[in-house]
Image (spheres, rainbow, N blue to C red):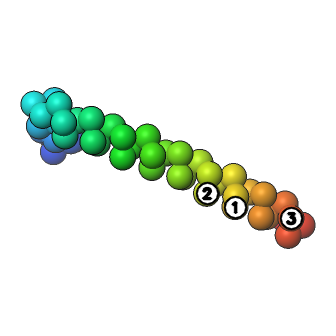
């Protein structure tokens, strides 16, 4: 928890780093969402 707080404080100090982290975070969520949908569709197609 303490490490996370210090990490976010560092991110706030650097706008560029914060922007990069935000972009990576959003892209990661999108990829996870697409992967989840693909897995669910795959299970349905497999009859599971």
User: Is residue 32 or residue 5 the one in the foreground?
Assistant: 32
Residue 2, how many percent across, how many down?
Answer: 15, 40
Q: Quadrant of the C terminus?
A: bottom right
In the rendered image, is residue 25 in sight?
A: yes
Q: Quadrant of residue 36?
A: bottom right
Spatial distance from mark 1 to mark 3, Cα to Cα?
Answer: 10 Å
**Residue 8 visible in the current orientation:** no
Task: Estimate the spatial distance between the alpha carbons at disc 3 and disc 2, rounded to whole Å.
Answer: 15 Å
Residue 45: mark:
3
Q: Is residue 43 above or below residue 1?
A: below
Q: CA distance from mark 1 to mark 2?
A: 6 Å
Q: Is residue 45 above or below residue 1?
A: below
State the residue at coordinates (85%, 70%). 46
Mark 1–mark 2 contact, CB under 8 Å?
yes
17 to the left or right of 24: left
Which dot marks residue 29?
none
Element under disc 2 = helix
Per the rendering, the mark at residue 35 is 2
Q: Residue furthest front?
A: 16
Q: Are the residues at dot 1 and dot 3 in contact (C-beta closer than 8 Å)?
A: no
* Numbered circles on residues, count: 3
Q: Residues within 10 Å of mark 3 (few under 14, many from 20)?
A: few
Residue found at the far bottom of this picture? 46
Indicate the position of residue 43 as horizontal and vertical percent values: 79, 64
Upstream in sequence: badge 1 or badge 3: 1
Residue hosting label 1: 39
Is 34 on the left-hand or right-hand side of 3?
Answer: right
Q: Pinpoint residue 20: horizontal percent, then vertical percent.
A: 27, 42
Element under label 1?
Answer: helix
Q: Residue at x 77, y 64 (%)?
A: 42
């Amino acid at each position: 928890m303490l490490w996370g707080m210090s990490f976010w404080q560092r991110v706030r100090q650097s706008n560029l780093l914060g922007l990069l982290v935000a972009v990576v975070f959003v892209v990661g969520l999108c990829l996870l969402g697409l992967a989840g949908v693909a897995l669910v569709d795959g299970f349905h197609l497999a009859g599971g």
